Image (tube, rainbow, N blue to C red):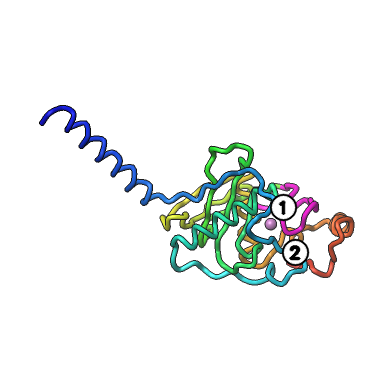
Amino acid sequence: MNCDVFRDLLARSFAQMARTAEQGSRTVQVPKEPLDQPPLTIHTLGARELRREARRVSKIDEATRDLARDMLRSMYAARGIGLAAPQVGVPKQILVIDLDIDEAATPPLVLINPEITATGASLNTYEEGCLSIPKVYLDVVRPSTIEVNFRDENGRPRRLKADGLLARCIQHEMDHLQGVLFVDRVTDELSLNEGLQQQGFERQHVLSIR
Ligand code: NI
């Protein structure tokens, strides 16, 4: 075999390997620049869609990844760091999270059928916000650390130990899958009433789960 033929074969087999790898790991990464016209509408406090329980996803396919991509585009457009499918009117257990929205290369996290398998003993207080309750930021107490099992966008089972902002964000987004919003967990009634009123939201749309 002469050298050129060998090189050609090698190049072809590398191209084949790259294609196979691409097919095996279908990315949902989309540009992070905010779009003027996001593909999905995010429902806000008072919408019935936010209070439904989301169903488990039985088959993770290209349609699932398309939804995740559109959720990410809509999340980036709103400059958020997390979005749950019920917020865009889809009652499925799908979350997208990206804590690094200003860094183009960082891949987002897609959590499908997430289950918290352990929570740490310590709690912390953090000021949360939500794309479904724009401009309202209030303190919520939650466990500081969690362990979560989920499927990724390619259907692979994953297990994650999270703390800090990631643990906070996953718990907030997972609440959406149960029809729970962060304002339902706020214990400071005065700040809650003030915060909602300032942004034109109605107190009657907050559920009492405290
Ligand atoms: Ni939210």
6 is higher (above) or lower (below) than 151: above
Horizontally, residue 69 falls left or right of residue 130, namely left
Q: Say which amino acid is labelled 2.
A: Arg
Point out residue 41 in the picture as x, y percentages from the top left corner: 68, 61
Q: Residue at x 57, y 44 (%)?
A: 31
Direction top: furthest residue: 3
Q: Residue at x 74, y 52 (%)?
A: 129
Answer few, some or many: residues within 10 Å of disc 2's Cα (few below 14, many 20 plus, some between 14 and 19).
few
Horizontally, residue 57 falls left or right of residue 90, namely left
Point out residue 200 in the picture as x, y percentages from the top left corner: 87, 60
Q: Residue at x 44, y 66 (%)?
A: 59
188 is higher (above) or lower (below) than 2: below
Q: Secondary structure at mark 2?
A: loop
**Residue 185, image quadrant:** bottom right
Q: How many marks?
A: 2
Point out residue 117 in the picture as x, y percentages from the top left corner: 51, 57
210 is higher (above) or lower (below) than 143: below
Quadrant of the rendered image holding ligand 1 = bottom right
Cβ of disc 1 within 8 Å of ligand 1?
no
Q: Which residue is mark 1?
A: 141
Q: Say which amino acid is labelled 1.
A: Val
Span colored in magenta? 125-143
Quadrant containing the C terminus is: bottom right
Q: Which mark, residue 210?
A: 2
Answer few, some or many: residues within 10 Å of disc 1's Cα (few below 14, many 20 plus, some between 14 and 19).
some
Point out residue 23 in the picture as x, y percentages from the top left corner: 37, 51
Residue 139 on the magenta segment:
yes
